[in-house]
Amino acid sequence: MANTSKLIWIVAVTLLIAGTLSGIAWYNNRENSLTEAVVVYPEPRPLKDIALLDADGRPFTEQQFAGRWSLVFVGYTFCPDICPTTLADLARIYPELQQLNEPVQVVFVSVDPVRDTPERLKAYTAYFNPDFVAVTADHEWLMPAVQQLGLIYGVYEREERDYLVDHSASISLVNPRGQLHASFRPSFDEQTQMPLVDGTELVRDLSRIVRQWGG
């Protein structure tokens, strides 16, 4: 499991290298004043053929990203650490996100559709904030959607009752045109060594991205 987890993180970092390298000049422009924790794609990537379902059984497609900024995080309700910590942090900063000039939504994508039933997903996200959107789908549709978001996951040892799922700890940012706009990268917590996105930095960076976006 340790080797598999290491591979997931390596692949996840690799997915961001292109955006990181191409964005160096953007970062070096001090007028942008963004932290190194965020990668902004010079050419936002359109999301296509997204076919997920929300916790109420309604279709969730790329159209649900239109007209608002979306913070998208992948995980699963049985996750022992990264998911509850990240969602709790997003819930903490949610009031600040709602004060930005444009609407912002938080979307939790479950990558464990077998165990994460709609009822469980709805209750799980509502525990952190009832406004959070929870979605999932069969892996046939789920994997392509997650990959388009620049994220990754892997389910292993499914024969075990309490199997774990490896997944990205980054948070993807989708702009109001339904395009992958940026990725908020995690750093490792000094005490727990868990990869976590800094909520305070996220608010600061997102605020500047929203102000600078051409619409």
Image (spheres, helix red, strand yellow):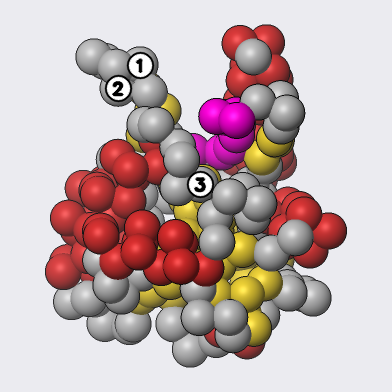
Is residue 168 on the magenta stretch?
yes
In the drawing, what numbered circle is on residue 189?
A: 2
Of the two numbered discs 1 and 3 on the same chain, state the one appearing first in sequence: 3
What residue type is disc 2 on? Asp
Residue farthest top in this picture:
3
Q: Residues within 10 Å of mark 1 (few under 14, many from 20)?
A: few
Secondary structure of residue under mark 2: loop
Identify residue for label 3.
76
Of the two numbered discs 3 and 2 on the same chain, state the one appearing first in sequence: 3
Secondary structure of residue under mark 3: loop
Residue 203 locus on image (x, y percent): 26, 57
Does residue 32 lie above or below 57 as drawn?
A: above
Residue 153 vs residue 70, the one in the foreground:
153
Q: Hey, which quadrant is residue 207 in on the image?
A: bottom left
CB atoms at circles 2 and 1 under 8 Å apart?
A: yes
Residue 163 locus on image (x, y percent): 60, 29
- Disc 2/disc 1 C-alpha distance (Å): 5 Å
Secondary structure of residue under mark 1: loop
What is the tally of numbered marks visible in this picture? 3
User: In the image, is 168 to the left or to the right of 144?
Assistant: left
In the drawing, what numbered circle is on residue 163?
A: none
Tell me the residue at 51%/47% (across/down). 76
Identify residue for label 1.
193
- Disc 1/disc 3 C-alpha distance (Å): 20 Å
Q: The magenta stretch spans which residues?
A: 161-169
Residue 42 locus on image (x, y percent): 62, 59
Is residue 93 on the magenta stretch?
no
User: In the image, is 120 to the left or to the right of 204?
Assistant: right
CB atoms at circles 3 and 2 under 8 Å apart?
A: no
Tell me the residue at 41%/68% (across/down). 122
